[in-house]
Image: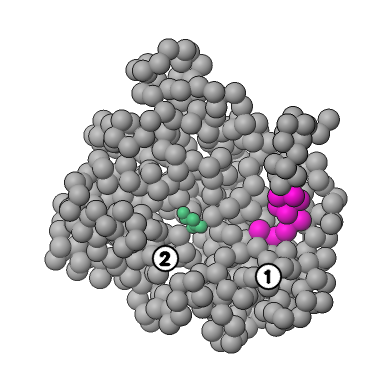
Amino acid sequence: MNHLNAVQATDPAVFDLITREEKRQATSIRLIASENYVSQAVLQASGSVLTNKYSEGYAGRRYYEGQEEIDGIERLAIERACALFGADHANVQPYSGSPANLAVYNAFCVPGDTVLGMGLPHGGHLTHGWKVSVTGKWFNALQYSVRKDTELIDYDEVAALAKEHKPKLLICGTTAYPRIVDFDRFAQIARDVGAALLCDIAHISGLVAAGAHPSPISVADVVSTTTHKTLRGPRGGMLMCKEEHKKAIDRSVFPGLQGGPHNHTTAGVAVALAEAATPAFHAYAHQVVANAKALATGLEEAGFRLVTGGTDNHLLLVDLTPRGVPGKPAAQALNKAGVVCNYNSIPYDPRKPFDPSGIRLGTPAVTSRGMGEEEMRAIARFIDRVVKNLDNDGELETVRREVAELCAAFPAPGLEHLQGDAG
Ligand code: DSN
């Protein structure tokens, strides 16, 4: 039986769109660093009848009756998060990463307070105080950068800004930074000025869980993460904190910022956390990093310049300037060829954010398909061919066919029913 038979019968238009998206995900090489494939188990839990239930409050203290099973699910997710990351406390209710971060501002600051985060053009996130986000509008948000010469976080600048402006909240964590973040250094800077430290590990939480990136848990006041990137859960958010901040964080999420939690998502998160505690996931996370390094080597051999000269984590930032090609047309041609990534600013980019100099590539999704270093070298060759043939539709079509053949040999989790479809 077709797993979407009810959607097909009720709403053929939505069925058609989902089916096409399934095929796109099955037959393309997905290199968007923040994306992944969840397991069938996570898909089933997230698509369950738990979506029918309202549960404002926390386990044992809800504002609606009928929570016998929901409490059990939320408690399981919390226990698993605490065990996996070694946290004192976890709140699994944030709808995603942005509300999770906003809940931390709400717990530690009032509007107008000074906060210090990494600038978006240097690899930070919108919610780290960037000017168009409410975190940049409602707070006195200062931004630190990477150094121009090394393209690495300028810890001296962070320390100097913190010393001068005494922020209430210091935020670290990145969305487009290919190197290890020195959480101990950030903790020292925060301690020196009496700031609370928020470590946003949205991109790397799967790596942290598996020990493939150092953990900030012991040094941060609060750790935020999305649940759907390297952690390989459904789309959601999570906060972990020291015992002393438990009350403030819980109150800030509910009733401070949100209403009822998305229980179907909580169940999917619980399943993903159980998966992330397995030896298979440990191997996966380390392979994500090995694959990123192999992709980096392949690209460098093909003449690409990588920001910082390589990677320590799951992503690479490629500066296309030496190839004489901007990021946007490259990303668009790659998409035509079935290699999906996003165009991205590079540090000190002379071009505009909507038409920047770089592309960002990540290995979480291709690694979930079981691809290894050999396939990364093949992907680097695909990228090189596309960048040399941006306007050559024939060559892009040839690459697209080869991409689909490679994908057919590595069935994607959750899409096994499409295995062998090289369309
Ligand atoms: N949009 C995410 C990313 O692609 O990095 C961050 O929230």
- The magenta region covers 20-30
Q: The residue tagged with tag 2: helix, strand or loop? A: loop
Residue 318 vs 259, above or below: the answer is below
Looking at the image, residue 218 sits to the left or right of residue 285; the answer is left
Can you tell which mark lies on residue 334? 1
* Residue pictured at 37% horizontal, 18% vertical: 62
Query: Which residue sits at x=56%, y=40%?
Result: 234
Residue 418: image location, x then y, percent: 81, 45
Question: Callout 1: helix, strand or loop?
Answer: helix
Verify CB contact (< 8 Å) between mark 2 and mark 1.
no
Place of residue 68 in the rendered image (x, y in percent of width and height, measured from the top left)? 48, 13
Instruction: In the rendered structure, find residue 242 and report the number of the disc placed on it.
Output: none
Q: Earlier in the sequence, mark 2 or mark 1?
A: 2
Residue bearing the label numbered 2: 123
Residue 404: % across, % down? 80, 60
Q: Residue 400, percent across and down? A: 78, 67
- For the residues labelled 2 and 1, the Cα–Cα distance comes to 22 Å
Q: Residues within 10 Å of mark 1 (few under 14, many from 20)?
A: many
SS assignment for the magenta stretch, majority: helix
* Location of residue 212 with respect to 415 vertically, above or below: below
Instruction: Report if residue 26 lies within the magenta region.
Output: yes
Q: Residues within 10 Å of mark 2 (few under 14, many from 20)?
A: many
Quadrant in the rendering for residue 392: bottom right
Which residue is at 45% across, 60% downward? 175
